[in-house]
Image (spheres, rainbow, N blue to C red):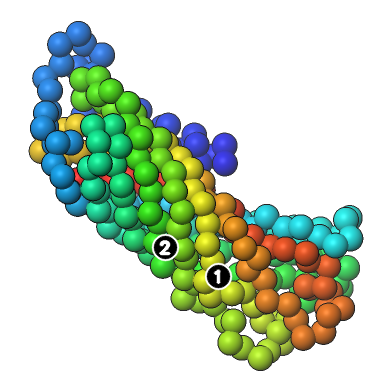
């Protein structure tokens, strides 16, 4: 989380300095796209990167799995509906690539100890965006809502399990999301870097056929946790 937050701040500062210069902090900056936010509906797209992790609860403490979150990338569309001067409804369908590496203790060979869980997600968030008062060409906001995710890489229908090196997860999950961002108004477009947390609501793990499986037998629940950093262009 700290690494992603640092990347977000670094990119934001570099972009603001390159595009705005001192005009952001001057008393009378040139106002770009003054009426942009008065549109009832507008569209955009985003690019970004993400890290997906699991929040895991165990039946017996002390037998935890080492889970490494790997960085992936995102791309998608944005539809924005203006509800009020400071409130918007947003739909942001996107394609997200991610993976986690699970390491189990107690095995003598790497073949049994490691499981790589790759995922290609179709992500469908419906969000409320609460914006502050615009100051010059900068307008911070917070965002939150619910989302549904379809894992195109899910092997939920497979009859094989970890005894055949198949770590199975469910295809559909539900989440809630919280985050913040900044709208930056340029002469011809609006640029919005944002950071958002995704918190899974339901258990995603499909247990092995053997209830005493060393891979899934001790897991009480396994839910998605993710950090998304998106760069949106309107």
Q: Is residue 204 left or right of residue 40?
A: right
Residue ID at (46%, 63%): 148
Extreme-front residue of the structure: 83
Closest to the observer, 38 or 50: 38
Residue ID at (38%, 54%): 126
Please state which of the two labelled residues, at mark 1 or mark 2, is closer to the viewer. 2
Q: Is residue 1 left or right of residue 180?
A: right
Which picture quadrant has residue 137? Answer: top left
Question: Disc 1 and disc 2: Cα gap in Å?
Answer: 15 Å
Q: Which mark is residue 60?
A: none
Badge 1 marks a residue whose secondary structure is: strand
- Up-down relation of residue 184 to residue 82 (above or below): above
* Residue 167, x across and y down, in percent: 67, 77
Q: Earlier in the sequence, mark 1 or mark 2?
A: 1
Closest to the observer, 112 or 201: 201
Extreme-bottom residue of the structure: 159
Picture quarter with the N terminus: top right
Closest to the observer, 134 or 21: 134
The reply to whether residue 51 is in sight is no
Residue ID at (52%, 71%): 172
* Residue 164, x across and y down, in percent: 71, 87
Picture quarter with the C terminus: top left
Residue ID at (89%, 60%): 60
- Up-down relation of residue 148 to residue 71 (above or below): below
The reply to whether residue 204 is in sight is yes
User: Mark 2 — residue?
Assistant: 123
* Residue 145, x across and y down, in percent: 44, 48
* Residue 168, x across and y down, in percent: 64, 77
User: Mark 1 — residue?
Assistant: 118
- Up-down relation of residue 129 to residue 139 (above or below): below
């Amino acid at each position: 989380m700290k690494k992603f937050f640092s990347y977000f701040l670094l990119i934001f500062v570099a972009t603001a300095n390159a595009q705005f210069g001192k005009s952001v902090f001057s008393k009378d900056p040139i106002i770009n796209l003054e009426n942009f936010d008065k549109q009832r509906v507008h569209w955009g797209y985003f690019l970004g990167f993400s890290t997906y992790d699991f929040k895991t609860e165990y039946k017996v403490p002390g037998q935890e799995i080492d889970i490494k979150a790997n960085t992936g990338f995102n791309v998608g569309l944005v539809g924005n509906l203006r509800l009020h001067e400071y409130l918007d409804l947003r739909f942001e369908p996107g394609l997200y690539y991610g993976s986690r590496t699970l390491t189990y203790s107690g095995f003598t060979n790497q073949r049994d100890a490691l499981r790589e869980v790759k995922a290609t997600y179709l992500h469908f968030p419906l969000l409320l965006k609460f914006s502050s008062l615009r100051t010059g060409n900068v307008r911070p906001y917070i965002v939150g809502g619910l989302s549904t995710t379809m894992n195109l890489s899910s092997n939920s229908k497979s009859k094989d399990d970890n005894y055949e090196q198949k770590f199975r997860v469910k295809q559909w999950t539900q989440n809630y999301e919280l985050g913040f961002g900044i709208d930056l108004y340029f002469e011809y477009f609006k640029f919005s870097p944002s950071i958002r947390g995704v918190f899974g609501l339901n258990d995603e793990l499909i247990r092995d056929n053997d209830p005493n499986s060393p891979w899934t037998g001790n897991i009480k629940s396994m839910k998605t946790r993710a950090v998304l950093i998106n760069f949106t262009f309107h």
